[in-house]
Amino acid sequence: MTSRSFVVTTACENRPGIVAALSTAIFELSGNILEAQQFDDIETGRFFARIVFDAARDLDEDAISSHLAPIVKRFAMDAQVRDQGRRRRVLLLASRFDHCLGDLLYRWRTGELDMDIVGIGSNYSRETYAHVMMGDVPFHHLPITPSTKAQQEEQLYALVKETRADLVVLARYMQILSDDLSSKLSGMCINIHHSFLPGFKGAKPYHQAHERGVKLIGATAHYVTTDLDEGPIIEQDVERVSHRDTPEDLVRKGRDIERRVLARAVRYHLADRVLINGSKTVVFPE
Amino acid sequence: MTSRSFVVTTACENRPGIVAALSTAIFELSGNILEAQQFDDIETGRFFARIVFDAARDLDEDAISSHLAPIVKRFAMDAQVRDQGRRRRVLLLASRFDHCLGDLLYRWRTGELDMDIVGIGSNYSRETYAHVMMGDVPFHHLPITPSTKAQQEEQLYALVKETRADLVVLARYMQILSDDLSSKLSGMCINIHHSFLPGFKGAKPYHQAHERGVKLIGATAHYVTTDLDEGPIIEQDVERVSHRDTPEDLVRKGRDIERRVLARAVRYHLADRVLINGSKTVVFPE
Amino acid sequence: MTSRSFVVTTACENRPGIVAALSTAIFELSGNILEAQQFDDIETGRFFARIVFDAARDLDEDAISSHLAPIVKRFAMDAQVRDQGRRRRVLLLASRFDHCLGDLLYRWRTGELDMDIVGIGSNYSRETYAHVMMGDVPFHHLPITPSTKAQQEEQLYALVKETRADLVVLARYMQILSDDLSSKLSGMCINIHHSFLPGFKGAKPYHQAHERGVKLIGATAHYVTTDLDEGPIIEQDVERVSHRDTPEDLVRKGRDIERRVLARAVRYHLADRVLINGSKTVVFPE
Amino acid sequence: MTSRSFVVTTACENRPGIVAALSTAIFELSGNILEAQQFDDIETGRFFARIVFDAARDLDEDAISSHLAPIVKRFAMDAQVRDQGRRRRVLLLASRFDHCLGDLLYRWRTGELDMDIVGIGSNYSRETYAHVMMGDVPFHHLPITPSTKAQQEEQLYALVKETRADLVVLARYMQILSDDLSSKLSGMCINIHHSFLPGFKGAKPYHQAHERGVKLIGATAHYVTTDLDEGPIIEQDVERVSHRDTPEDLVRKGRDIERRVLARAVRYHLADRVLINGSKTVVFPE
């Protein structure tokens, strides 16, 4: 292979000429655009784009960033360049339930999720995960009590730093992150909410759903913000339920929804398909 | 045809022998059971059944009720017998938007909804419905203002009585019924909520959904109770949306969901498939 | 309004510089790009794009085409420019079943489908459509028998020409078009196939599906080609069915799927979102 | 717990009195019916029922069968009684792809699938399954070549006998069973077809689907019969795809559909919810 591919994502105020400027710059780099998607948010006047292009082997992220710098400056862009060969470094956090953790690990082993898993952290001990194939991934037991929450979060954040993780996935990590940690992980931490947001907040959402007699249950993957369960939504899905389903049936059906919704959200994030737009997201489809 | 079919629905406290008693009684009437579904709610101990059977032409609802009376008494049942040839009498109420109204009328004209429409009521005038084919169905303009709400509801209820309606369908009737009228219509009034309950209550739910950046929108059909938008849910459905969808797009997609969810709920009700179970429903599938 | 918006669609062999050239040309016209989507078909090397832009009020389709001509020539593009204010002229064809016809007319009346309906043709007489609100749309009874098929198709094609229709929608028009007519209407004629292609071809697909005991049924909207039921697919959808469903139930559920799938396909076509790619389509999402 | 629960399934020609007879017999056993579903196939005149009931601890399958024997004889029923505490013995067969195998094992470990896995067989060696957590489940390498197919099937069938398996699951086992083995495993062998039957038969169905430009792909779980890929369908599901999806993307999305469709089919079978009705199934919903 004599070429490599790069993905550029940008967000800025919408003005005429952005696409022309970007595509001309890529053409100047002898880049061949493979995919390009853009979105104008009419309400906010923000413009978002994602461009994938092939370029000669001797180009790299820095060279591209330098070449794009005048455009980035001119349009006051938030811009990001990533060599698609550079895999993201991902830290997984879990608690008692292992279905999301096990599913992400499986998709990673089979190459479906193109990432490096740099560690697994949990407030439960490693023995909790007898049903999960962890292989050589470093496991970190990070116990937590109300009085040690601050220290535990310090450990957690130190782990993010040490492992140079650029994505933290809360794979049913049942601890609420403090505002401080949520802020530090802003835009780089994905949570799966085990119900159809914003329907049922708080504890035991499946039991709430059962109590309410709903005919559909769902799950929501979103970025973590200081506003609990209100972060920008990346992906959602539902399944049909009936009066026959007990709360336990809902929990079981919910596991299937949770793991596929979280896996999709992680996949979209890894491919730079998700751009944050205030309290919402732009998700450029696969 | 020398036979006719009947549907019996019952609800009572669960005890051994109910099914044996009912099926034996139907056998004594020379009935041939075509469909039977039952449900035990383990939590509440309530038992629900729906039985459809063919019987000789000379049987009627009263004769069957008399024959079942000892069982009904013995198990303290709520029981209902309906000759499937006796169509329900339905009153439709609408406001400015006509998509649910038009859809129900179409399904009625083509025989998909097996009912007699005894009237259409609206707080808007007949001219509002230029896009809808009403045929000979009597139309009742029932204007409403904050100060005339009580009188208008009296008119409305008088209309229910006059037309001997046994089902009232709020086909996007955008008025909140008073507690008094809601109580009077308890169990015989179906509403379509133009969003995925209990996600977005209150005004402009599609705009709320857009603001929140959801990836799915939906609609909920439910029985009207005094607890606004919290009545027993009959049916729900969703569709996928994206960041590209404006609030107007959500409203448009919502129309499709609303009309099919409401049509299904009405269809289930007309076939005696929906039994109210406290704040929930049992919906025996088609 | 001092601006108007245009949509440009192009297809050509993929080569570096296409996006740069197009976006620069639009910038030169003082156009402001509102939406842009593109697709590279790696297998065939074909490149497809759809660009929507606002421009000054004095621009028109011809001026834009002239300005783009050198690029169109340079890249050997198939290109199309449409003023979004110029509505397409649509001819609807139906047979005995009216659910798709009625649904398209409803969506047109309410402005959901942005088109001019220039006529309705049918091999059945106008009386067949007692359940459908046709308003002033000219109706053409085009009876057909095996021996008059050729003449009827001549009449049909003459009608297309007279009405200057640029889209023909087979809204459950149950006649198979001849190869000759199919060719003449190539790329401008959409059919709804009343089953999930390519599952069940031929007559009575719902009965075939019932016989086979499927758990899902569906419908497919596609462009008409000389290859019966094998034209490029635009849209598909399914619904769940069960052993309880009779063939008649499948037909009933099928009607709901058919009408929404056809309406979506027509909507996508009207917005120039569908580009034909050999035996397939590229459908740029809303 | 002083009671145990049993599930009775029956199929026979429909005649009046079946439900009365069965429910009376269960009442005589002091059984308390927890769930009962029945279905009359109007076309074939066959009647199907599934009844779950609690009974005293000293009852067992044999005692119940004896008590029901006169009814079974009178109505010429196919009847089956199972103590719900008696788990089925399941043999899993796989080939190169492990996603269905891994998923079934996971659901078994977590108790979601209530069965005993008595063995795993494959025409690939154990090393193939490095990504799968097999634990102590006996693994059987059963290599096959065109010339050893007959012997391999003998080994396979011997394994079924030795392990006293009462269900064989082809978890993407990519070998076509001979008519002889298919017959021997009739009604006790479930396959997952990696496409939406009957759309694409034969090799590489996802590539066929891609070639055809479909907008939905799916999977079908069915009982194995001598008629390849035409056995009675138990469950199906689909997912939306687009022109952007390569054949590899379809394969990836297909994996998710396959594993959930197969898991559901196995779950329904394990709970005696699936009754074979000629070339179709009756699936009593959960």
Image (spheres, coloured by chain):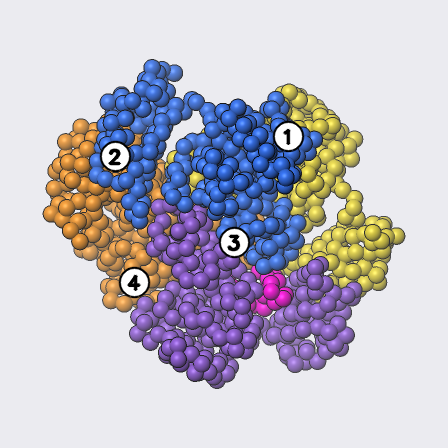
Chain colours: A purple, B blue, C yellow, D orange
Image-based side of D128 in relation to A104, left or right: left
Residue topped by disc 1: B141
**Amino acid type, label 4:** Arg
| Secondary element type, mark 2 | loop
Image position of B157 with respect to D96: above or below: above
Residue B199 circle label: 3
Distance between the Cα atoms at labels 3 and 4?
Answer: 35 Å
Residue B75 circle label: 2
Of pointers 3 and 1, the one earlier in the residue sequence: 1
Distance between the Cα atoms at labels 3 and 1?
Answer: 33 Å
Of badges 3 and 4, the one in the foreground is: 3
Q: Position of residue A105 (x, y in %)?
A: 41, 69
Of badges 4 and 2, the one in the foreground is: 2
Tell me if label 3 and label 1 are in contact, CB under 8 Å: no
> Mark 1 and mark 2, same subunit?
yes
| Secondary element type, mark 3 | loop
In the rendered view of the protein, which quadrant contains the C terminus of chain B? Answer: top left
**Quadrant in the rendering for residue D135:** bottom left
Of pointers 2 and 3, the one earlier in the residue sequence: 2
**Amino acid type, label 1:** His
Residue at 64% x, 78% y is A61
Which chain does tag 1 point to?
B
Residue at 42% x, 71% y is A175
Question: Does residue B68 appear in this view?
Answer: yes
**Amino acid type, label 2:** Phe
Of pointers 1 and 2, the one earlier in the residue sequence: 2
Tell me if label 2 and label 3 are in contact, CB under 8 Å: no
Of badges 2 and 3, the one in the foreground is: 2
Residue D109 circle label: 4
In the rendered view of the protein, which quadrant contains the N terminus of chain B? Answer: top left
Callout 3 crowding tier (Cα within 10 Å): few <14, some 14–19, many ≥20: some
Distance between the Cα atoms at labels 2 and 3?
Answer: 39 Å
